[in-house]
């Protein structure tokens, strides 16, 4: 049933989990919406709005007064079950809990972690180098950021495959797990670690955060579960997806490989630009008040889906947005890859550091690499879009 307040000329049938052509080109599949109005209503997935123009996406993402994070996703029931802290909170409550998480992810901790990121990256590259090729997604992109995150929260690296699958079910559900089952699996895994950190704080991220008072008091066990659940899922998929897109660009553009090898001082700016050019994260909001935008009214109770790709790649938002220019000199807050406003990603600094380290180590240790012409690149949609296969080849070195 299409709500009466939705104009007929705004109705589309666009499945955010499977946009047309997404397997071949995630970005092209989404950019088809840029040719229409600034906001549309899709009949897929129960019906919801989609911000479909850069200025609309950016302004709605930044509207934390009338658009709430409570729903978490357009997937029915996901938000009611997950109850993430601080992601699903709003207002003063969100600010208080977010501050504790931000202190746990303070820049001094990120800087201190960098040698470990370098160490893991070098180990992975050394293992891959003699083989002359790899599936970059399975053999690097899904391993490095997850290993770093597991080191950050001090949990066993051998648990990586189990946790990776939970992350996939959250961002790209395939129906094999119920929402309740996904939440319970995460809680069953995390609870022993949470208990230990609350009783005997260590030097890990969970301990740093749980040691911070919230509104003048200690964290409750329920709050600790919800926060750790949020950080677990937040660290599983997003950086892996970004690594894949960055590697894909470099494989397709050997001239950029050459430039960054010859001028490694450009790498931080290159990381920022590649993160702008290849955004794959989207957020969902539920309206808690009516919002007039682009000639329509989002009614209280409506769901709104906001894809960062439609801000970052809108020609009205950036000059020649499809072009990668390492001299754009844009600050990371100018684009929407990591969000905007009160709910901008708390791990943005950590993610940026990981991308910089990846670029620096991969380009300094690997020979020129390219896509394997015998195997296809594959992509997938979802709340975090990603490459599912990137076959790379290079001249093997023994």
Image (cartoon, rainbow, N blue to C red):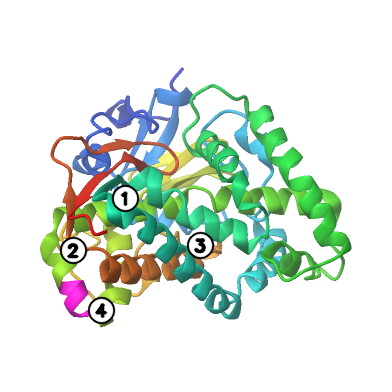
The image quadrant that residue 185 belongs to is top right
Do labels 4 and 1 touch, CB within 8 Å?
A: no
Q: Mark 3 points at which residue?
A: 344
Q: Which is in the foreground here, disc 4 or disc 2?
A: 4
Q: Is mark 1 on a helix, strand or loop?
A: helix
> Residue 40, position in %: x, y?
34, 36
Q: What element carries label 4?
A: helix
Could you tell whether 146 is left or right of 27 in the image?
Answer: right
Q: Name the residue under label 4.
A: 264
Q: Is mark 2 on a helix, strand or loop?
A: loop
Mark drawn on residue 232? none
**Which numbered disc, 4 or 3, marks the residue that appears first in the sequence?**
4
Give the residue displayed 25% in from the left and 48% down from the top.
Answer: 133
Q: Give the magenta part as a residue range.
A: 259-263
Q: Mark 1 points at which residue?
A: 309
> Residue 218, position in %: x, y?
86, 64
Q: In this view, does 20 lie above or below 30?
A: above
Using the numbered discs, state the Cα–Cα distance from disc 4 to disc 2 in whole angstroms.
17 Å
Mark drawn on residue 324? 2
Do labels 1 and 3 touch, CB within 8 Å?
A: no
**Which numbered disc, 1 or 3, marks the residue that appears first in the sequence?**
1
Q: Residue furthest front?
A: 398
Q: Which is in the foreground here, disc 4 or disc 1?
A: 4
**Which numbered disc, 2 or 1, marks the residue that appears first in the sequence?**
1
Q: In this view, does 84 lie above or below 360?
A: above
**Which numbered disc, 2 or 3, marks the residue that appears first in the sequence?**
2
């Amino acid at each position: 049933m299409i709500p009466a307040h939705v104009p007929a000329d705004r109705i589309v049938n666009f499945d955010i989990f499977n946009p047309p052509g997404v397997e071949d080109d995630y970005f092209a599949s989404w950019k088809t919406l840029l040719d229409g109005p600034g906001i549309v209503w899709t009949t897929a997935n129960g019906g919801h709005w989609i911000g479909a123009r850069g200025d609309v996406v950016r302004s709605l993402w930044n509207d934390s007064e009338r658009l709430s994070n409570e729903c978490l996703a357009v997937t029915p029931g996901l938000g009611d079950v997950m109850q993430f802290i601080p992601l699903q909170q709003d207002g003063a409550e969100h600010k208080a809990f977010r501050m504790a998480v931000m202190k746990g992810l303070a820049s001094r901790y990120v800087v201190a972690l960098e040698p470990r990121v370098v160490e893991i990256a070098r180990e992975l590259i050394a293992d891959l180098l003699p083989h002359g090729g790899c599936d970059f997604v399975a053999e690097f992109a899904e391993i490095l950021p997850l290993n770093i995150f597991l080191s950050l929260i001090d949990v066993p690296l051998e648990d990586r495959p189990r946790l990776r699958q939970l992350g996939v079910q959250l961002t790209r559900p395939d129906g094999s797990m119920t929402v309740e089952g996904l939440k319970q699996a995460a809680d069953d895994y995390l609870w022993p670690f949470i208990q230990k950190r609350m009783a005997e704080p260590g030097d890990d991220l969970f301990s740093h955060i749980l040691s911070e008072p919230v509104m003048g008091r200690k964290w409750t066990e329920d709050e600790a579960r919800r926060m750790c659940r949020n950080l677990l899922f937040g660290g599983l998929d997003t950086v892996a997806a970004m690594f894949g897109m960055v590697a894909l660009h470099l494989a397709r553009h050997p001239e950029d490989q050459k430039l960054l090898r010859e001028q490694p001082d450009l790498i931080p700016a290159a990381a920022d630009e590649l993160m702008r050019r290849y955004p794959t994260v989207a957020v969902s909001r539920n309206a808690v008040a009516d919002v007039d935008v682009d000639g329509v009214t989002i009614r209280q109770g409506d769901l709104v889906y906001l894809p960062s790709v439609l801000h970052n790649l809108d020609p009205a938002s950036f000059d020649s947005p499809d072009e990668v220019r390492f001299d754009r000199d844009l600050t990371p807050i100018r684009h929407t890859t990591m969000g905007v406003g009160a709910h901008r990603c708390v791990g943005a600094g950590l993610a940026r550091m990981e991308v910089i380290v990846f670029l620096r180590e991969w380009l300094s240790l690997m020979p020129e690499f390219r896509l394997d012409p015998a195997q296809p690149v594959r992509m997938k949609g979802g709340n975090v879009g990603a490459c599912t296969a990137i076959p790379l080849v290079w001249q093997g070195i023994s």
